[in-house]
Amino acid sequence: MLIMAVINSPIEWTEATWNPTTGCTKVSEGCRHCYAETMAKRLQAMGQPRYGNGFKLAVHDDLIALPLHWRSPKRIFVNSMSDIFHKDVPEEFIQRIFETMNVASQHTFQVLTKRPERVAAIAHKLTWTENIWMGTSVEDMRVAHRVDDLRQVPTMVRFLSCEPLLGSLIGLDLARIHWVIAGGESGSGARPMKPEWPRELRDKCAEQGIPYFFKQWGGVQKHRTGRVLDGQTWDEMPFVSVQR
């Protein structure tokens, strides 16, 4: 089950991860140093059977119902090792993932994609219970159009993951966005994040009453740079009343 599900996730803004699909393909600059690809290749070298094909897309039918067995309420990041809205994930498989999330009302599911155009296209075929949050990645203004696609999705919470933050987002329209996560790139080859970039986002969020979560400064050794921004740890989350 390694990397297929993590109960105590080290990702600061979630509590658990669930990976009914693994593997992906790159679509923008935010993918250049993909942590999931690096991890997948490492697991392949270790002989982990789920990653026998490295980072090639794979669906795992036997993991569809996994969250139903977790009784304690959790915030669950869906697909930390993939993107369920990749063009090669069958629509029927996505619907089954949503059916699990619909039934597991004790959990809050945080779904993140770099392909919100597909989400918008098939949203009417999915059931959007209030425990499903839908987000998209926005690393710089070149992919700001993703936010327009996200706004078309009838989800309780729309959120942005601005990580790795590769440029200023001062011109980004945050209308109908309910949560913003920001952070610098980490790991080998990490590209630097200018301090003004996360500050601009924080200030825009404050002006519009949007919760702001600063995940990390990043760098090759992110534990050394930490996640304090201007003397404060920004851990704001959207408040949503979900059946527990």
Image (cartoon, grey):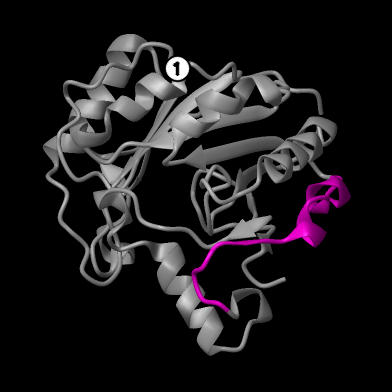
- Crowdedness near tag 1: few (<14), some (14–19) or many (≥20) residues, C-alpha within 10 Å: some
x and y percentages locating residue 198 in the rendered image: 23, 36
Quarter of the figure with the N terminus? bottom right
- Magenta-colored span: 53-71
Amino acid type at circle 1 is Arg
Q: Secondary structure at mark 1?
A: loop
Q: Residue 67, how many percent across, how many down? A: 79, 48
Q: Is residue 170 above or below residue 100?
A: above
Residue at x 58% of width, y 51% of height = 79
* 225 with respect to 167 (left or right): right
Q: Could you tell whether 109 is left or right of 216 in the image?
A: right
Taking the image as shown, residue 162 lies to the left or right of residue 219, namely right
State the residue position of label 1: 151
- How far from the left and from the top, in percent, is residue 89? 60, 49
83 or 167: nearer the eye? Answer: 83
Query: With respect to residue 63, does 115 lie above or below?
Result: above
Quarter of the rendering containing residue 225: bottom left
